[in-house]
Image: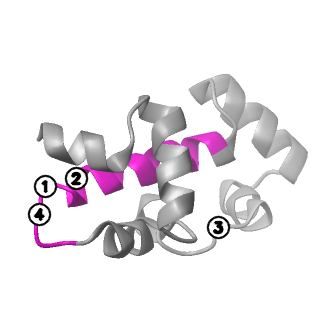
């Protein structure tokens, strides 16, 4: 997942990579991580965004794109739900 955070990841591709059916992959993934594959992916994208925010010259729109979010608004919504803070508040705290 980490290697393709900025692109589209489909469940059927992940399940095939694991050698499982989609339903078995989702169930097994959730049992081992405590999250659905999509929740896990969003968490990893937020983590990448947090890392990229350490560069003050990068705009939030660029960071959103490089982290795999559809746009800056999407990143802000997910970022806040995961961290409890908006990206701009988080960035100011660095």
* Mark 2, secondary structure of its residue: helix
Distance between mark 3 and mark 1 Cα atoms: 26 Å
Disc 1: which residue = 54
Discs 1, 2 touching: Cβ within 8 Å: yes
Disc 4: which residue = 55
Task: Please report whichever mark, 3 or 4, sits nearer to the chain's N-terminal start.
Answer: 3
| 70 left or right of 4 in image | right
- How many neighbours does mark 1 have within 10 angstroms: few (below 14), some (14-19), or many (20 or more)? few
Q: Nearer the viewer, mark 3 or mark 1?
A: 1
What's drawn in magenta, residue-wise?
A: 39-58
Color encoding of the figure: one colour
Task: Write down the quadrant of residue 11 in the picture.
Answer: bottom right
Q: Is residue 44 magenta?
A: yes
| 60 left or right of 18 in image | left
Q: Residue at x 33, y 76 (%)?
A: 62
Distance between mark 4 and mark 2 Cα atoms: 8 Å
Q: Residue at x 41, y 67 (%)?
A: 64
Look at the magenta stretch and give its main secondary structure. helix
* Towards the viewer: 65 or 39: 65
Disc 3: which residue = 9
Distance between mark 1 and mark 4 Cα atoms: 4 Å
Disc 2: which residue = 51
């Amino acid at each position: 997942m980490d290697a393709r955070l900025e692109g589209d990841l489909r469940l059927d591709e992940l399940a095939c990579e694991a050698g499982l059916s989609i339903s078995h992959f989702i169930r097994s993934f959730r049992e081992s991580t405590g999250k659905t594959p999509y929740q896990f992916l969003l968490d990893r994208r937020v983590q990448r965004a947090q890392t990229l925010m350490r560069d003050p010259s990068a705009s939030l729109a660029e960071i959103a794109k490089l982290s795999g979010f559809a746009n800056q608004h999407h990143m802000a919504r997910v970022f806040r739900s995961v961290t409890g803070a908006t990206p701009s508040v988080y960035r100011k705290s660095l």
